Amino acid sequence: MKTENDKFNVFVKGKYKNFEDFLEKNKDLIYNGVIDSFKELLGSRKRKIKYTVNATVKLETNEVVEWNTEFLLLKNEPDILIDHIMQHYENTEDYEKCSEILNLYKELTNNVK
């Protein structure tokens, strides 16, 4: 993952059965980028950060799919951490990561959830 100014980037390249296989195998990488982006926001005066995922996915059919997406993450809207990211780590029973996410969320919202 590389950082430049107000932007986090992650690059993925690989061969997968299908697009769902790509997403499943790279969820941790993608979601950790969201977490790191919010950590960057927490430690700065920035109000927003762009997080981009650029992927070249080669499918078993030899079709190559370019998937480039950009997330605009806002410091005052960290609900994605609880609503989406933490759910993944609960499902994989990574409670250490869940605790990290919850603490980050509390710091961002000054909440004592």
Image (spheres, helix red, strand yellow):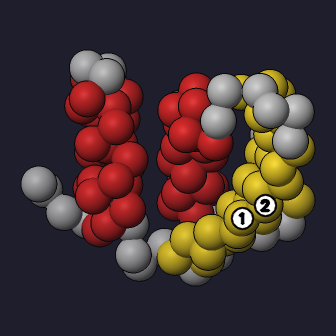
Q: Residue drawn at (34%, 37%), measured in percent from left and top?
A: 88
- The amino acid on which the numbered mark 1 sits, given as a three-letter code, is Thr
* Side of 53 relative to 89 (left or right): right
Disc 2 secondary structure class: strand
* Side of 37 relative to 90 (left or right): right
Q: Which residue ends up furthest to the front in the rendered image?
A: 61
In the image, is residue 85 above or below residue 62? below
Disc 1 secondary structure class: strand
Tally the numbered discs.
2
Which residue was labeled with disc 2? 68
In the image, is residue 51 above or below residue 100? below
In this view of the protein, which residue sits in the foreground, 66 or 33?
66
The numbered mark at residue 108 is none
Q: Quadrant of residue 91?
A: top left
Residue 2, position as x, y percentages in the image: 85, 45
Q: Residues within 10 Å of mark 1 (few under 14, many from 20)?
A: few
Residue 96, position as x, y percentages in the image: 32, 22
- The amino acid on which the numbered mark 2 sits, given as a three-letter code, is Asn
Residue 38, position as x, y percentages in the image: 53, 57
- Is any part of residue 76 visible from this angle? yes
In this view of the protein, which residue sits in the foreground, 17 or 110?
17
- Is any part of residue 8 visible from this angle? no
Give yes or no for contact between labels 1 and 2 (Cβ–Cβ under 8 Å): yes
In the image, is residue 113 above or below residue 102? below
Which residue was labeled with disc 1? 69
* Side of 78 relative to 56 (left or right): left
Residue 67, position as x, y percentages in the image: 77, 56
* Side of 31 relative to 87 (left or right): right
